[in-house]
Amino acid sequence: MMANEVSDEGARRAVWQAYLQIHAAVIRLLEAELQKQKDLPLLWYDTLEALIQAPQKALRLQDLAEAINLSQSGLTRLLDRMAESGLVERRPCENDRRGLFAAITQAGEEKLVEARPVYQQVLDEHFLHYLSCDEVAALKKVFDNIVQMEGVYAPVHELAAD
């Protein structure tokens, strides 16, 4: 057993179950409030966030699919709908004629800026409100460690290397 492992299997399962319940509840609330207040599905919000955080505000399609946990076909349908709404666009890769990028548009940036306060309010009221600064720091450290040890997707946003 590793030094930092909890020895009680029941306690470890309980932590996992509590995490799943909290996550599901907050996701439902985020989805409902973003849709109600900004007519924006949560998946669209997540897509816009992934794109705006990338250098040049664009990601290769396969990187975006992984970042938002969608299949390639699911991403294609999502981007079709978002492009019809003017929030994203597809751009060819200059170094790979077969490659495509998804990029956020000005309208997408504006929609994201409008939606962020709603997203933050839900997080604050239904999750962060219950945590002290020390608990937030501890959770960040735990999640950062898991991401690093498990190789959880952290997109490499280097369009210049493409």
Image (spheres, rainbow, N blue to C red):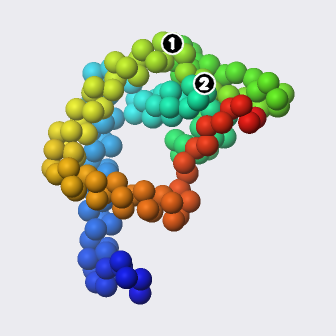
Q: How many marks?
A: 2
First in residue order: circle 2 vs circle 1: 2
Residue 97 in which image quadrant: top right
The three-letter code of the residue at mark 2 reads Gln
In the picture, measured across the screen, residue 30 lies left or right of residue 143, that is left
The image shows residue 109, relative to residue 51, as above or below, that is above
Which residue is tagged 1?
Answer: 106
Q: CA distance from mark 2 to mark 1?
A: 13 Å
- Is residue 26 rendered to the left or right of residue 42? left
Say what amino acid the circle numbered 1 marks: Gln
- Does dot 1 land on a helix, a strand or a loop? helix
Look at mark 2 in the image and give the residue it sits on.
56
x, y percentage for residue 39? 36, 21
Q: Quadrant of the N terminus?
A: bottom left
Of the 4 image quadrants, the one containing the C terminus is top right
The reply, left or right, for residue 13 in relation to residue 150 is left
Q: Residue at x 27, y 21 (%)?
A: 37
Q: Residues within 10 Å of mark 1 (few under 14, many from 20)?
A: few
